[in-house]
Every structure is written in C-alpha cells, then in structure tokens.
Image (tube, rainbow, N blue to C red):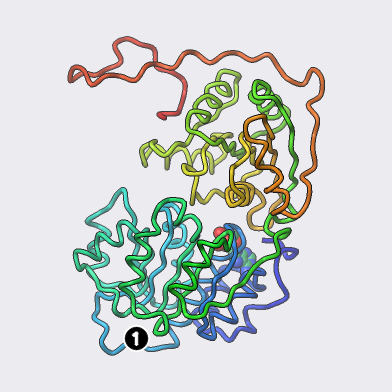
Amino acid sequence: MTSKHLSDTSFNTLALVEPVARGIAEMGFEKCTPIQASTLPLALAGEDVAGQAQTGTGKTAAFLVAVFNRLLKEPASAQRRARDPRALILAPTRELAVQIHKDAEAIGQFTGINLGLAYGGKDYEKQRQILEDGVDVLIATPGRMIDYFKQRVFSLDAIEVLVIDEADRMFDLGFIKDIRYLMRRLPPAERRMSLLFSATLSHRVLELAYEHMNEPELVRIEPGKVTADRIRQVIYFPSNHEKIPLLVALLQQMDPSRTMVFVNTKRAAEVVQGYLVANGIDAAAISGDVPQKKRERMLAEFQSGKLPVLIGTDVASRGLHIDNVSHVFNFDLPQNIEDYVHRIGRTARAGAEGDAISFGCEEYVFALPEIESFVGYKIPTAAIEPGMLPRLQRPPPRPRKKRPSGPAGGRGGRPRRRSRNSG
Ligand code: AMP
C-alpha cells in the first residue's frame, strides 16, 4: 500500500497492547488505511461498528487488530470452558476465511492467541480436532460452523467479539438464515462487541446491523471514493456480436497477465473461454462447479502469472483473494452496483494501479446509469476503431456430457479438448 492511500493516523497513536503493536510493526504497517483510521478508534473503545469497506482497503487488519486488542485487554469470562471460542469471525467463502486466518496468524504472531478455522469442502476431521482442543478466535464460514456447533464441538456462550465480514455477500450467497441462526445463539448484543464490514451498507445490511448489533456506529466512505481513483475506468459500447472480437482485440493489444474477465452467466464464461483459447489466449473459466482442487490450482497458476486470464461470474469468484490483478473486464456489465464495486476493486488493490474496462452491450447496458450514479461520475467512453475487430477462429465444438455408462466411462479415443474449464 503506497503512502498516498494511507491516512495520517499512525498505529502507534492508538495505544494498542504491546503484542498487537509488535505484530503490526512486523507487517510493516505504520499508518492506518482510511477504513482503519475511522473504525479502529471506535472498536478499540468497545463500540459496535458497521463499516463500508471492500477488499483491498485494509479492513481485515482493522477488525483483527480490534479483536486481538480486546481479547488481550479483557479477561475471558470466568464461566468459559476451554473449548469455547472468545471471538467469532464469519466470512462468506472459504477463500476469504483462509485469507483472514493467514492475516490473523501474521498480525497475531506475538499474542499467543489460538486461532481456529472452519470452512466447508475439506478437512472435516482435522478442523474439528483443532476446535475440540479449544481456540480463542474461530474464523469460519457459516455452514461448517453451524455443523460443528450443532454437534456441540464448542458453545457460543463465551463469545465476546463477533465479526461479520462481507455482509452483503452473506445475503447474495444465501447465508443470511445461517447468520441469524448464529446471532440468536450468541450472548446478547450488549454483552459482546460486534463489527460488520460490507462493500455497501445497503438497506438489508443495515437492517441486519440494527437488529443484531448494539447501536452500531456507521462508517461510510463517500460513493466516489468507493471505486478508488487509482482505477482507470473506461467503457466501450459493442453490439452483442462485437463483444468477443473486441475482448480478443484488447487482450492482444496488451500484456494480459493477471486479467480477470467478468461475465454474468456460466454459459458466457464457457463461450468466452472457448474463443480466447481458440485465438491463442490462454484462459480458464472458474465456475462454481469446478472442483475445489482444480479451482485452487487455477488460482495458483493465475497468481503466479502462469495463467494470464481468468474468466468468472460474480458467484464463482466471490471471496477469492487475488492480488495485483492488472485488468478487470466487465464483459457483461453487472446487474447490481455491489458487483461492480467488488469486481473493479480487484484491480488496484493495496494501492496499486489498475484498469477496469467495461462493455455496455445491448443486453446489459441498462445497468449503466445506476452504476454511474453510484460511483458519482460518468465513466469515460472509448470508441471501437474501424479495423480494430479481428476475424476470429471458432472454438472446436464442446464434447457432449458423458452419460454414466460402463465402469470405464473413459475417453473412448476422443481427443482431449484443450480447454481448462471443467464447467
Ligand atoms: P484487505 O482489504 O484486508 O484485503 O487488505 C489489503 C492489503 O492491504 C493487504 O495486503 C494488507 O496486508 C494491506 N494493508 C492493510 N493495512 C495496511 C496498512 N495500514 N499499511 C499498509 N498495508 C496495509
């Protein structure tokens, strides 16, 4: 994060307990980011906070510092049993939970606070064993967490701090019932500190905050600032059939390493991927039904720069922590503001510069006025120059889905397709 994107507030003016201050210094953080500067003084004073912050603003460190500081300053309740966590951090996706855990290990390295992680998809027994041994801070996705809770692996009676990260995503991903279920089983709002972060403080998020938090202070960022000035935004207006040639043309003109292409449907992800690969651009589509192992491999390849282009829907890419994305394409304009903010926030994270290139096509352009009124200005337009659109190679036909026939179920001599998408 460059100094331009930090506030004037130094961490050493916040009177943090020594092990937390040491962790922060070890990370090389000196000044707070704006969201840290506005939420930490409140949270360190024990107030509930609902903060508007997207990925890349330093929100994770904001709540981790508040959690650790609180746990070290206040003694645990005398009735607490060894298995009962003192703080609960809820995240909508496993990728986000894993990232928070990683940041917590780093910032909390001198605190002696035990961390636990619970997320679906793998390591059921391993995670359970760690929770049985007792943790101070539990970082979890709602489903797996409720599973263990119902089995009485731990209780929620000793929770002193609750953090809900990416609250708007909790709604989008259908976890809101789970969140409410957990909230009702926590100590009452007045007896715990609650912190909530969300890319937008929309009506439904605020309703949740007022219902389950103790008079939360709202920390908002002005709309114009949400989409960080360091992101260069531009919009083209292609017809539907010009979209793929335009994408190929733009990708061919630039070094496309670390480019994310957002689409609105899984089908579009597959089609776009097929055309990019057929036209010499290595690309993978990350859809929700790609198995976890394969997803992780794709992400690792993307992170390392080996895979230049990743295509995904909002659902498939939610919560993925991908740093240093250089270009975000809105191949399809998103149909709600939150997705626009989340998408373009993936570039220019941690103060880097980035480009967000949108296509306002016949089908989805109607979302543009709302997006522009939210970001607070007109997105500069770019023209499709004559001769700019290349003739494309068509992708080979996709193999039909196999029927579950014989036990071999094998390839039957059919050539393997080049596509990475298992979609
Ligand atoms: P987050 O929004 O939590 O995903 O954080 C974005 C990035 O900013 C992470 O790589 C953090 O390590 C980094 N970061 C968070 N707080 C600070 C800070 N005060 N100074 C410099 N970098 C920071």
Residue 131, given in percent of the width and then of the height, sits at 26, 67
Q: Is residue 306 visible?
A: no
Q: Quadrant of residue 297?
A: top left
Secondary element type, mark 1? loop
Residue 194, given in percent of the width and then of the height, sits at 46, 75
The residue at 75%/46% (across/down) is 232
Q: Tell which of 25 and 50 is nearer to you.
A: 50
> Looking at the picture, which amino acid does disc 1 mark?
Ala
Q: Quadrant of residue 374?
A: bottom right
Residue occupied by mark 1: 76
- Can you name the residue that lies furthest to the top here? 413
- Report the quarter where the C terminus lies: top left
Question: Is 77 situated left or right of 398 in this image?
Answer: left
Question: Is 233 situated left or right of 331 in this image?
Answer: right
Residue 402, given in percent of the width and then of the height, sits at 30, 19
Number of marks in picture: 1
Q: Quadrant of residue 116?
A: bottom left
* On screen, residue 202 above or below 238: below
